[in-house]
Image: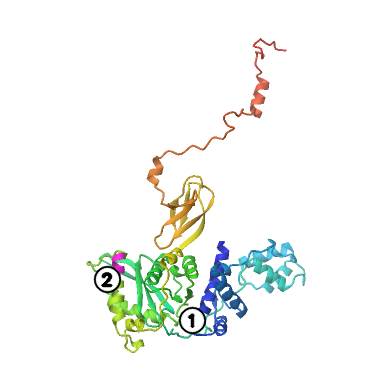
Amino acid sequence: MEKDDLKAAVTRYAAVSLALAKVAAGMTLASAVRATAAQCVLDHHGRAKRLSRRSLYRWVAAFKDGGLDALADRPRTSSAPTRVLPAAFVDFLVTEKTSDIDASLPEVIKRAVARDVIKEGEVSRSSVWRCAVKLNLPLFTDKGFGKEDKRRFAYPHRMMMVITDGKKFKAGVKRKRRVSMTFLDDSSRYGLSGVVGFTETSVLFLRGLWKVIEKWGLMSTVFIDNGSGFTSGDSKQVCAKLGIALIYGTEAYPEGHGKIEKYHQKLIAELLRGLDGNPDVDPAPAALEHRLVHYVTEVYNRDGHESLASDTPEKRFLEDPMPLRPADLVEIRKLFILTKKRRVSRDHVVKVKGKLYETPAGYAGKIIKVFHHVLDGTVQMLHEQRLIRLAAPDLALNAISRRSAPPAREDETCRVPPKTSGMLAYEKDFAPVVGADGGFKEQE
């Protein structure tokens, strides 16, 4: 899937996730589509847009049949964006919409008439619209979220929705910056698992998601915020492969943030505030993750919760009649492997997630497929019909190692050098004084 197609697919997947999450909560598909169409959805440019019910029905059906790939744009049969609009106007349309994305199509048409690019009434608005869609030009202006129907929700059973968010804190005597990420069950507030890392990344989120699936099985929906670790393409692709609906909460949106923020208040008061500047605390992420998991499982899950009528999250979660969805972990782990296309540099290096990896000789300038294992961070490629693991280039070793000579062509050993123009001019002015038979030739 190409990069532009992937952006369009994950945008539609966000809308599909919103509708499927409402279906999981007990709504009919028609009601879920109607409610989703009334909300604003962020496109891959970060702008809010509204969707039609017809599009949502089509995307939901396509996703159920073919997954994320089915949501990508179909390839155009013709490379030309239009056959009815003048080429000069098409160029003008691209220039104007690129420099002024908020300009409407009627406004662009008026500008073209004013600048004598076209005549009055020469082009129709519908033809310009279809051309702009084919060229993937920005067509929607930002819409405010002030009129959104914001309502709190509560899913009735466990593992129907999992909410998570990152929380930054400092630990150790040197006050090292770290971030924690806890996964809570929406229905019971039960802490499913937690991870700690240096920054909020997609790798940290997916590692925490794997820990939850490994212990409790698959969930139906994940509710997250718009942090960099959640909005990346890796997170969306993995969740789409797993069949997990992914919902992004907007700023100050009360649907899920209130629950995770209330948890963070307890986390800060009962754990994190005691780590800042403490000389007895190991600031390594693994050591801090051990403390976080212990707090979640042994303290938070066994403490009475006001919203649960003083029941503990552990009691509510374990007594829930909804059966868990155990999964084949071997097959599920394979879904955390992402395929990416990369062009190999002239010094046989590719970049994946900001890190350099060295490929075997012979791939310089070629586009290859690399397999990124999100959970363990390894990168592999197919070389001579087998997968090999790529490593970072050893710059010190490369500085002293010999370079292999390029293979000689078969015709180079017997090839006669050509007579260049310079050689011909020299032979003309300085002809040999001895003939072919070795005799002396008199000069005329």
Count of marks overlaid on the render: 2
| Picture quarter with the N terminus | bottom right
Label 2: how many residues lie within 10 Å, few (<14), some (14-19) or many (20+)? Answer: many
Q: Start and end of the magenta stretch?
A: 286-290
In the rendered image, residue 131 lying in the magenta stretch gets the answer: no
**373, 268: nearer the viewer:** 373
- Looking at the rendered structure, which numbered label has been put on residue 24? 1
In the rendered image, residue 287 lying in the magenta stretch gets the answer: yes
As drawn, 23 above or below 130:
below
Pair 2/1: label in front: 1
2 or 1: tag closer to the N-terminus: 1
Q: Position of residue 397 (x, y in %)?
A: 38, 43
Residue 189 visible at all: yes
- Looking at the rendered structure, which numbered label has been put on residue 275? 2
Helix, strand or loop status at disc 1? helix
Q: Position of residue 224 (x, y in %)?
A: 44, 75
How did the renderer colour the structure? rainbow
Q: In the rendered view, does 186 fall on the left or right side of 145?
A: left
Residue 440 in which image quadrant: top right
Which amino acid type corresponds to the residue marked 2 in the rendered image?
Answer: Leu
Q: Position of residue 358 (x, y in %)?
A: 44, 50
Which amino acid type corresponds to the residue marked 1 in the rendered image?
Answer: Ala
| Picture quarter with the C terminus | top right
**Separation of marks 2 and 1 at Cα, in angstroms:** 39 Å
- Looking at the rendered structure, which numbered label has been put on residue 268? none
Determine the residue positioned at 62% across, 79% down: 54
Helix, strand or loop status at disc 2? loop
